[in-house]
Amino acid sequence: MKKIALIVASLIAFVTMASTALADTTEAPSPTNLVEGAGGAAGNGGADATAFTGGDTSTAAIVVVALVAAGLIALWIARRRVTQAS
């Protein structure tokens, strides 16, 4: 059981590190690509409205999934230990 937990924890760490490294190697957009209407008056949604693209959350989502999986595995291991000790 300890070997399985170690393998799972190693895989989670590897995926987290690899996803962070892959996210860091993406190319930045070319500075010649201008968003039409950026910096204009907000509210009308026309050509002079400010563009908002939001942030990239894929790396954060992977880390959250990995931490939740690690927590669930830790709870499962603790539950098994309690039932075996009783």
Image (cartoon, rainbow, N blue to C red):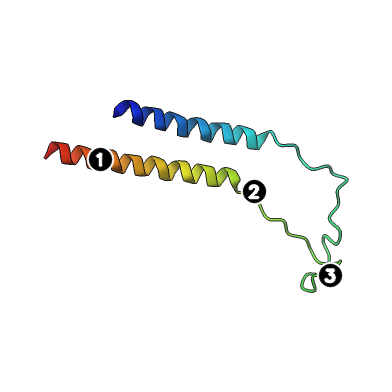
Q: Is residue 62 above or below residue 54?
A: above
Amino acid type at image mark 3: Gly
| Residue that appears at 54% across and 32% down | 17
Q: Position of residue 85 (x, y in %)?
A: 14, 37
What is the residue that sits farthest to the bottom in this orientation? 44
Q: Which residue is mark 1?
A: 78
Question: CB under 8 Å between callouts 1 and 2?
Answer: no
Q: Which residue is mark 3?
A: 46
Between the C-alphas of marks 3 and 1, the distance is 57 Å
User: Which image quadrant is residue 86 in?
Assistant: top left
Q: Is residue 40 above or below residue 26?
A: below
| Label 1 or label 2, whichever comes before in sequence order | 2
Q: Position of residue 84 (x, y in %)?
A: 16, 37
Is 70 positioned to the left or the right of 26 in the image? left
Amino acid type at image mark 1: Ala
What is the residue that sits farthest to the left in this orientation? 86
Is 60 positioned to the left or the right of 22 in the image? left
| Residue that appears at 41% across and 32% down | 9
